[in-house]
Amino acid sequence: MKMIQDWLGHSDMGTTANIYSHIDSESKKASASVIGDALR
């Protein structure tokens, strides 16, 4: 993420993260499943 920030010229990594880090619905489901399994 830091390299992307530098390449794009963003002054802070928060800007880069807000624009370029997206979690798709399948990733959300997989993460919820792992958390659910750990809590059982």
Image (cartoon, helix red, strand yellow):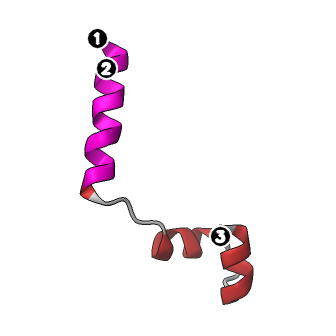
Asked whether the residues under the numbered discs 2 and 1 touch, taking CB atoms below 8 Å apart as contact, a structural biologist would say yes
Residue situated furthest top in the rendering: 40
In the rendered image of this protein, does residue 12 appear above or below residue 24? below
- Magenta stretch, overall SS: helix
Q: Is residue 34 magenta?
A: yes
Amino acid at the residue labelled 1 = Arg
The residue positioned 29% from the left and 35% from the top of the image is 32
Residues under labels 2 and 1: Cα distance?
Answer: 5 Å
Amino acid at the residue labelled 3 = Met
Q: Which residue is mark 2?
A: 37
The residue positioned 35% from the left and 27% from the top of the image is 35
Residue situated in front as seen by the camera: 14 or 29: 29
Q: Which mark is residue 20?
A: none
Q: Secondary structure at mark 2?
A: helix
Residue 2 on image: x %, y %: 71, 69
Residue 27 on image: x %, y %: 33, 50
Q: Quadrant of residue 40?
A: top left
Q: Which residue is mark 1?
A: 40
Pointer 2: residues within 10 angstroms few (<14), some, or many (20+)?
few
Asked whether the residues under the numbered discs 1 and 3 touch, taking CB atoms below 8 Å apart as contact, a structural biologist would say no
Instruction: For marks 2 and 3, give the one nearer the viewer.
Output: 2
Residue 38 on image: x %, y %: 37, 18
* Magenta-tinted stretch: 26-40
Amino acid at the residue labelled 2 = Asp
Residue 1 on image: x %, y %: 65, 67
